[in-house]
Every structure is written in structure tokens, then in C-alpha cells.
Image (tube, grey):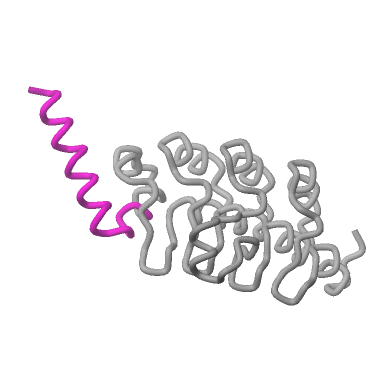
Amino acid sequence: MHGSLIKQQQNCHSDIVQTNPSTLHAAMFSKNKELIKANVNVQNTNGHGALRMTSINGDIKMTELLVKYGADVNIVDSQGRTPLHYAAYFGTIEIVQILIENGADRWCIKGSFLQSQFGNSQIVDTRGFTPLHTAAYYENTEIVKCLVENGANVNATDNDGRTPLQWSQHQGHEE
């Protein structure tokens, strides 16, 4: 009997999260593990999901939990950005490491998605920025080092033909 009730509750949680992505976001903030397990990859109409949010707000424990429950570390939002882009931008080195350790694409190439959207599998977001471009642009030195140490392409160019180093120099960064 208890097993049946638990199964029904899990199905109910899954249905709620599937139909209302903000339910997952609320579950995340309230640390409701049962709701979080329902569908960790649900996104709203802008492609914003839970892992994107934890990458932005620097929530290391929730990022670990989402990854544990099967969150797609390479999920792309409507701007073509992955959680690694946001972690690089907001400067949470621990989240960058968690994402990379769990298979995040350091170049954030989503082959078929990007080819169908832009005709070029090397373009990563709508500006052509890789996470390394983003970290260099905003002078997140620790994250630049982490990405380079993990094999990020330092010669990748964006839509304007600029490398991460060129963007860093353009912004007046000295490191």
C-alpha cells in the first residue's frame, strides 16, 4: 500500500512539474527534493531551467543535486547558452568544475541544434561566445584558468571574429 501511494505521489509531482516549469523553480528554492526529481530538465518558454538558475545564483549544493538527478549539463536556452555559460559569467568556479566533471561541453557545441539554427556547429550563443569568451569578457580569471586547463579552445572566434583573449584586451583587462 505504501509503495503504491509513493508511486502515485511521484507521478503527481512529475505531472505538476511537466505542466508548470515554475513549480520546479519553486521546488529548487524550497529544497523540495521530491519535486526536483520529477523532471530536472523542464524549461520555461525562454528555455530557462533549474540548472541555469543554479549556475546564475551560485547554488553549489543544488547544482550537485540537479546533476545527481540527471540534469542535462549541456541543455541550451533560447539564446543558445548552456549552464556553463552562466557559471562562467557569474564567476562560480565550483559550479564550473561540477559542470565540467559531469560532461559539460567546454566549447558548448550542440551540433545538430546549432547547425539547424545557425548553419555552423561552432557558434555557441547568439553572439558566438563560448564560455571562455564570456569569462574573459567579464574578467573571471579563475574561470578562464579552469576552462583553459580543461581544454577550452583559446582560439575560438565569435561572430565578430574575436578570440577570448581579444575580448579581454578590448575590455581593458590586464590579466
Closer to the camera in the image, 12 or 123 = 123
Q: Which quadrant of the structure image shows residue 141?
A: bottom right
Q: Is residue 58 above or below residue 168?
A: above
The residue shown at (55%, 71%) is 118
Task: Tally the numbered discs.
Answer: 0
Residue 107 appears left or right of 3: right
The prevailing secondary structure element of the residues shown in magenta is: helix
- In the image, farthest residue toward the right: 174
Query: Can residue 11 be seen from the camera position used here?
Result: yes
Residue 163 position, x and y percent, is 80, 65
Q: Quadrant of the N terminus?
A: top left
Q: Is residue 6 magenta?
A: yes
Q: Nearer the viewer, residue 161 or 92?
A: 161
64 relative to 164 in the view: left or right: left
In percent of the image, x 18 and y 41: which residue is there? 11
Residue 14 against residue 135 in the figure, above or below? above
Q: Residue furthest left?
A: 1
Within the image, what quadrant is residue 90 found in? bottom right
For the point 17% across and 38% down, the residue is 9
Answer yes or no: is residue 53 visible.
Answer: no
Q: Write down the region rendered in magenta.
A: 1-25
Image location (x, y in percent) of residue 92: 66, 50
- Residue 109: percent from left, percent from top: 60, 55
Q: Is residue 120 magenta?
A: no
Q: Is residue 22 left or right of residue 16?
A: right
Question: Residue 147: x and y, percent?
Answer: 74, 48
Q: Is residue 35 above or below residue 170?
A: above
Task: Tell me the quadrant of the picture where the C terminus can be found.
Answer: bottom right
Q: Quadrant of residue 57?
A: bottom right
